[in-house]
Structures are given as C-alpha cells and as structure tokens.
Image (cartoon, helix red, strand yellow):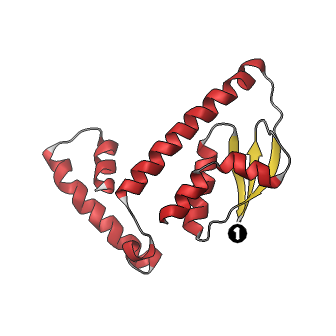
Amino acid sequence: MIFTIFWIVLFERATPFILFTAPLISIFSIKISEKFLLKDSFYELYYFNIFWLIKYSFYLIIEIYKSGLSIIPNIITGHSNPDIVEIYTDLDSNLQVALLANSITLTPGTITMDVHGQRLKVLWMDPKTKNATMAGIMIKGRLEKLLKEVL
C-alpha cells in the first residue's frame, strides 16, 4: 500500500491507469527485492507495524521542528562551533541502527557521518558537551527508545 501511494505521488495524479498499475508495480518490486536482494520474505525479516510507524514519524517530525527552532539563533548570528562526537547505541539490529542514524541526520544541526557497529560518528553544529554518554542522550533523545520498542 505504501509503495502504491508512493507510485501515485511520483506521477502526481491518480488516473485509472495509474490506480491500476500502481499495485501491480508495487507487488512486482517487492517480489523482485525479496528474491534477489533479501533472499527471504521482507515480512519475516523486518517486523512492520503501521501504528508504530505513524507514532515514530510523528515523534521524529516533532524532534525535527524542535531542533530546527533551537538552531535558528545560531544560523542568524553566525555562531557555529561544529564538532564531531562519537555516540554509542544499545540497538541490536542493523535496521535499527540505520533508522537511528538517518533520523539523527534528518534533525537540523546533526549529521551522522559514520556508522560502525553500535558506534555512530556525528557532526554536531553546536555541541553542548564532549562527554560521549551525555552527547548520546542529547542527540538520540527518545528516538532510540522508540526503535527498541518495536523493531
């Protein structure tokens, strides 16, 4: 269903032809990915819960706006003191770590530069601390906890 919606958004219209072909292309894409890339069923490899996805997306959007509002004064004044910090995560799977790294990059003022196992190297625009533990708490926020809940 998500791929179908994505297909319709790409075409920017919902004609009968697109509404008919979108589910077919979506199913075909999933089957090809499962057979050649994943080597197993997507649904068996990755648990997917639409309610959790909505909850995580909502929280991520809130974090993006909070971070954006907090970084605006630095942008206006030109005050920037970027530094690279290493943070560690308790997440186990590669999917969880990848989602966390991408979520950190989506929030203004932070960019995940490198991921090695459970260690993330993050470029932080205005670091509040050099302590890896405290920096991890400030950067990850509740994102890590939400990822642990379901995935």
Q: Is 64 situated above or below 50?
A: above
Q: Is 145 situated above or below 138?
A: below
Residue at 54% across / 59% down in the picture? 147
Residue at 55% across / 66% down in the picture? 95
**Horizontal and vertical percent position of residue 106:** 59, 43
13 vs 125, left or right, is left
**Horizontal and vertical percent position of residue 16:** 13, 46
Residue at 58% across / 57% down in the picture? 145
137 vs 62, left or right, is right
Residue bearing the label numbered 1:
117
Q: Is mark 1 on a helix, strand or loop?
A: loop
Check the picture and name the quadrant holding the N terminus: bottom left
Between 146 and 107, the one lying in front of the other is: 146
Look at label 1 and name its amino acid: Gly
- Quarter of image, res 86: bottom right
Residue at 63% across / 55% down in the picture? 101
**Horizontal and vertical percent position of residue 3:** 33, 56
- Quarter of image, res 83: top right
